[in-house]
Amino acid sequence: MTADNVLVAYGTKNGSTAGIADIIGETLRTEGLSADVVAARQVRDVSGYDAVIVGGALYMGRWHADARRFARRHAADLKNRPVWLFSSGPLDDSADTGEIPPVGHVTRTVASLGARGHVTFGGRLDENARGFIARAMLRNGRGGDFRNPERIAAWTRQIAAELRGRVATGG
Ligand SMILES: Cc1cc2nc3c(=O)[nH]c(=O)nc-3n(C[C@H](O)[C@H](O)[C@H](O)COP(=O)(O)O)c2cc1C
């Protein structure tokens, strides 16, 4: 089995998780793999992919619904291939200064899918964010872009190395 065709699926409300997924896709391509970056709700079938990376924005301690539904709907296929998960959320530098464990239901998803890993990346909240609570958070000075492209790329390079290792060993 080759492992060169990777799906990066994301659930987002305000677009910043899509930006993280784009960095992951670009990094995989730089590493010589092929990658499709697709909104999770638009994915009909994962069977054409050798590996899948699924990310969700965190809202009120839960993954965005599109990421939750994706993991549920495609569970049977995801269990059969290498899968990594990521969450995006913290609006401070806490994701860069320590490992933030997945929220409860994502922890269960890691286990049920046999995911190879999970990481939490910093998020973004800006003046275009939709929703009453988002606007209140902005008024309280909680806005900012805490995504870290270098950390996202470094995590992705580890995945690329693991996938290349599978190809080399045929495992
Ligand atoms: C109403 C609201 C609730 C949020 N809840 C959480 C949360 O529970 N945990 C967290 O780490 N970040 C939380 N955040 C921050 C978002 O996860 C962050 O803004 C993220 O980057 C949004 O992703 P998106 O732009 O892809 O929708 C929240 C943001 C808003 C506006």
Image (cartoon, rainbow, N blue to C red):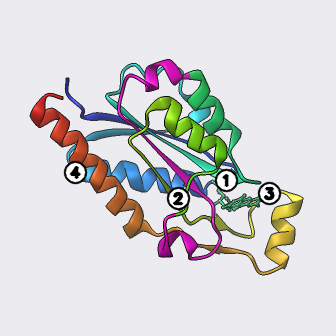
At x 63% / y 66%, what residue is drawn?
Answer: 90
Front position in the image: 36 or 115: 115
Location of mark 3 (residue): 130
Query: Is residue 107 something one can see in this rendering?
Result: yes
Location of mark 1 (residue): 58
Quarter that holds the C terminus: top left
Who comes first in sequence, dot 4 or dot 2? Answer: 4
Who comes first in sequence, dot 1 or dot 3? Answer: 1
Q: Is the CB of mark 1 within 8 Å of ligand 1?
A: yes
Q: On the rendering, which quadrant does ligand 1 occupy?
A: bottom right
How far apart are the alpha carbons under marks 1 and 3? 14 Å
Q: Is the CB of mark 2 within 8 Å of ligand 1?
A: yes
Write down the region rendered in magenta. 74-99
Location of mark 2 (residue): 120
At x 77% / y 54%, what residue is drawn?
Answer: 60
Task: Point out residue 25 in the picture as x, y percentages from the top left corner.
Answer: 38, 48
How far apart are the alpha carbons under marks 3 and 4? 35 Å
